[in-house]
Amino acid sequence: MPELPRRFQSRGLELVSPIWPWSGYVGQGDGTLRVSSPWGERTHPVTGAKKRFHNGCDLAIPVGVELRPVAVGRVQKVWDDDDINGHAIRIEHVEWWSSYVHLSRVDVHVGQTVSPSMVIGLSGGAKGAVGSGRSTGPHLHLSVWVADDNGRPETVDPVPVIDWRPLTLTGAV
Ligand SMILES: [Zn+2]
């Protein structure tokens, strides 16, 4: 299992049973899920701009998969902007946050307490579809932030945070 980000370790934070943010969906072939675009520096798939920082990872899942929060938390923001994110949800955990972007449906409201036993929305991302924002094909953009020393969100790679392991049917919730 990959190590948790330094921020989590240095602050003594532990993730309580983080899970994959969807249910009942198994990825391709060997059961692993494809990361179509990793967190970090990259060439933007739409603009072609170099070195645009990608503040999440893109997971290649089809439209309409039920999404669950990666941990217990409270819905901090639900928004919709056509030009970038489309329909999106941000959840506040204890000193860290997660967000779910390009959704085809949102099932929660601000202030609501959520847990991995709940569906918070459906995946989306199909080009030109409602809720997709600037997305060229079905995927989930998942972001994670950890509070810095001033309490401000600092982006981290979601992969080690949610215990990136091959997805199996029994691993899905
Ligand atoms: Zn993305």
Image (cartoon, helix red, strand yellow):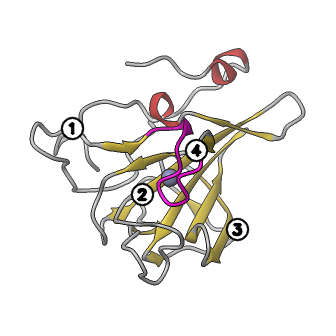
- What residue is shown at x 30% (from left), y 65% (from top)? 65
Q: Nearest to the eye among marks 3 and 4: give it.
A: 4
Residue with the mark numbered 4: 54
Residue type, mark 4 in image: His
The x and y percentages for residue 9 are 64, 17
Q: Is residue 67 above or below residue 73?
A: below
Tag 3: Cα neighbours inside 10 Å, few (<14), some, or many (≥20)? some
For this orientation, the residue located farthest to the right is 150
Tag 1: Cα neighbours inside 10 Å, few (<14), some, or many (≥20)? some
The x and y percentages for residue 139 are 37, 59
The x and y percentages for residue 117 are 40, 57
Q: Give me the disc on residue 140.
A: 2
Q: CA distance from mark 3 to mark 2?
A: 23 Å
Residue extent of the magenta highlight: 38-49
Residue type, mark 1 in image: Thr
Q: Give me the disc on residue 111.
A: 3
Q: Give me the disc on residue 32.
A: 1
Return the disc, 1 or 2, that comes first in the chain's sequence: 1
Q: Nearest to the eye among marks 1 and 3: give it.
A: 1
The quarter holding residue 150 reads top right
Residue type, mark 2 in image: Leu
The quarter holding residue 75 reads bottom right
- What residue is shown at x 54% (from left), y 32% (from top)? 15
